[in-house]
Image (cartoon, helix red, strand yellow):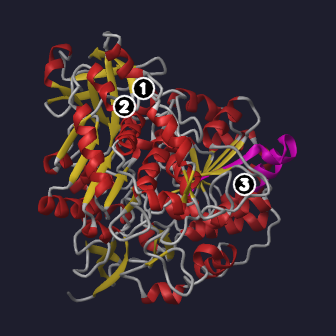
Amino acid sequence: MENIETIDSVCTYCGVGCDIAAHVDIKENKIKKIFAHPDGVVSQGKLCIKGKYGFDFVDADDRLRIPRIRKSFLEKNPAIKEAVASALVDFDDTWYECDLDAATTACAMKLGEIQTNYGRKAVASIGGARTSCESSYFFQKFTRHTLNSPHVDNCARVCHSPSLKGMRATIGEGAATNPYNDIYNVEFMIVIGSNTTEAHPIIANRILDVAREHDNLAVFDVREIKLHRFAKYKAIMPHEANLLILNMLAYVIIDEELYDESFIEDRTKGFAEFKEKILNDPYANPDYFNEIEGYEYLSKLVRKVAREYALKKSMIFWGLGITEHLDGSYAVMAITHLALMTGNIGKAGAGLMPLRGQNNVQGTCDMGMLPYYDPDYQEPKEVGLMTPQLVDEMLEGRLKAVLNIGEDLTHIHPNLNKIDRAFEELELLFVQELFMTDVANRADIVVGVKSAYEKTGVYVNAMRRLHLSQPLVKSDLPDDWEVLQILDNKMGGDANYKSSQDVWQEVQRVAYRRFSGADYHRLEKHRKRGLQWPVHTEDTPILHQLDFRTDDGYGYFKYHQYKLRGMIEEITNKNLQGYHLTTGRTLAHYNNAAQTKRSDKLNDRYDEDILLVCEEDAADFTSEKVILKSEFGETNPLRVKITNKVRPKTLFATFHHAKSRINALFGDARDELILTAAFKTIKVEVINC
């Protein structure tokens, strides 16, 4: 252990936000091992395989360390080329390398030209959930104030924006109500639209601990997942049935008068109208499932789940299987309705847990990296456009420049053929990244930046827990906010932060409703435990104990009826044909795999996206690999695996590897309110290779 130092920080992957510790060889400046302290509050002393082994990316050979400028960009912009010529070094046929000053000068000159020619709103900033709160905060501030463009957005657009929308509409706050350890206080749990053991394994550990001991878990999914093995109620449902089932649960609770009258009377509004609508909705009666061939058993199962949920201290967990649908926001409202009508909110062991995706997507939204919210979810002076609308603006010639931090826009967003066309219309794409990802390879200017393991910053996990990271290894690369500050000054801004702490102190003043008491000193003192916002004199582990965070303190019922469509409509009409694809993660990889595929221990487990096919459908799959095709595009060949874990006519694939082009299948179908793509179902044609 000579030269080895133990340094504490936070995991760079999912929204669980585990506390980590690293053995670092100080002499070599190299991470040797990552583990969790036995008393880690989030990790409970355990890490998933990504947390344990997914650190090789830090000193990977292909790490982006020197800024690059595309040669063809400079040929089109001779004045810029002349201004930075002395810094240019030939790299290959496509790129020059340069220093940071030249890269930011080129960017600033082009931004100025674009805004002069096309107007201030011809520029948008997208991304930030992979970086710290400090960088996300300054990203939106620089865009809104220095560039004077309202167009800011982040990857919540393709994951949990419907959770924010649905929860704020009903209870005034779009975040988890309870800490993870409250799972040990529950009497009943519902998991819907979350493959928790794969996507959020350290939360799944808690769920499994309780389920094994108390047999009190209900799991709803369109395919069999590991959680089903431990569930008392094992529900496999048709595609796009979330809102249908959630409204049915509410129907049973109302029909059998299992609701909490005093809680409803004291703390909610709109229940009488909600009750009348739901009791007169033919789709809300669980008997409707008696007409859905192959799913008739759900009629009785839904009733049993509703009774246990209503009569016990209960918690609901959900993921992208809820939010990535046409009715994602409405489904989240339906989840909060269940909590409101039974009083399962605002106390220990009862609440709502949206399982956020990225390690700082909660914090990035808190920082105002959304077109319709300033920091602290305040109203901005001008509302900007959401990412799908910005793509349309590119195609229509009104949006000409995109600044991007750590979001692989051309891999993780839907309708890739449309995205490809849109990005070709840009005059400037400026990317801050760790690697030459798909979007970085399309950029005009790329700047390599510090990773989470090389910098100091605040990250907010899925239970509102603030964790102050510290560098595990030293790096001479800039932090994201430092690049932006250079750019800001060249664009006429006056930013003058000396450290990330300076930025955070400003966040505390601007976003004081949540962060006024969360200074660096306090966050350092509570590094293992963290602090849950809002943080003033104390932090707040459980929200909504006395009132809701709406304007008047009441919770609201806002009923929305399920609309018959897709697989259920086909089954009803006796014409279920073709295949319905759903997508999700695997444990070994994270999103676009930019970091995880640099670790052999992870990539060797899953080096390509695999297509799961039901045994009953095997006859249609006559080759080792198939291409999936929709009306919007097609994948590259995918390896087929026959299994009994998916239902007939249902296919499942992961989306981690850009080469698969899974997202080329999806069009512009999206949540009605908040434009999150409907990634969880698409009808596809199978082409054997």
The residue depicted at 71 percent of the width and 49 percent of the height is: 151
Q: In the image, which disc is placed on residue 480? A: none
Q: In the image, which disc is placed on residue 285? A: 2
The crowding category of the residue bearing disc 1, from other C-alpha atoms within 10 Å (few below 14, some 14 to 19, many at least 20), is few
Whether the residues at callouts 1 and 2 have beta carbons within 8 Å, the answer is yes
Residue depth check, mark 1 versus mark 3: number of the one nearer the observer: 1
CA distance separating discs 1 and 2: 6 Å
Q: Indicate the position of residue 516 as horizontal and vertical percent values.
A: 61, 81
Three-letter code, disc 3: Ala
Q: Is residue 110 magenta?
A: yes
On the question of residue 525 being in view, the answer is yes
Three-letter code, disc 2: Asn
Q: Which residues are magenta?
A: 106-129
CA distance separating discs 1 and 3: 61 Å
- The mark nearer the N terminus, 3 or 2, is 3
Three-letter code, disc 1: Pro
Q: Indicate the position of residue 27 as horizontal and vertical percent values.
A: 33, 84
The residue depicted at 65 percent of the width and 82 percent of the height is: 498
- Residue 500 vs 263, above or below: the answer is below
On the question of residue 661 being in view, the answer is no
The crowding category of the residue bearing disc 2, from other C-alpha atoms within 10 Å (few below 14, some 14 to 19, many at least 20), is many
Q: Secondary structure at mark 3?
A: helix
Tell me how many marks there are: 3
Q: Secondary structure at mark 1?
A: loop
Q: In the image, which disc is placed on residue 282? A: 1
262 and 430: which one is in front? Answer: 262
- Residue 616 vs 16, above or below: the answer is above
Which residue, given by chain and number where applicable, does mark 3 sit on?
106
The crowding category of the residue bearing disc 3, from other C-alpha atoms within 10 Å (few below 14, some 14 to 19, many at least 20), is many
Q: Is residue 377 left or right of residue 133?
A: right
Magenta stretch secondary structure, dominant: helix
When asked about the image quadrant of residue 343, the answer is bottom left
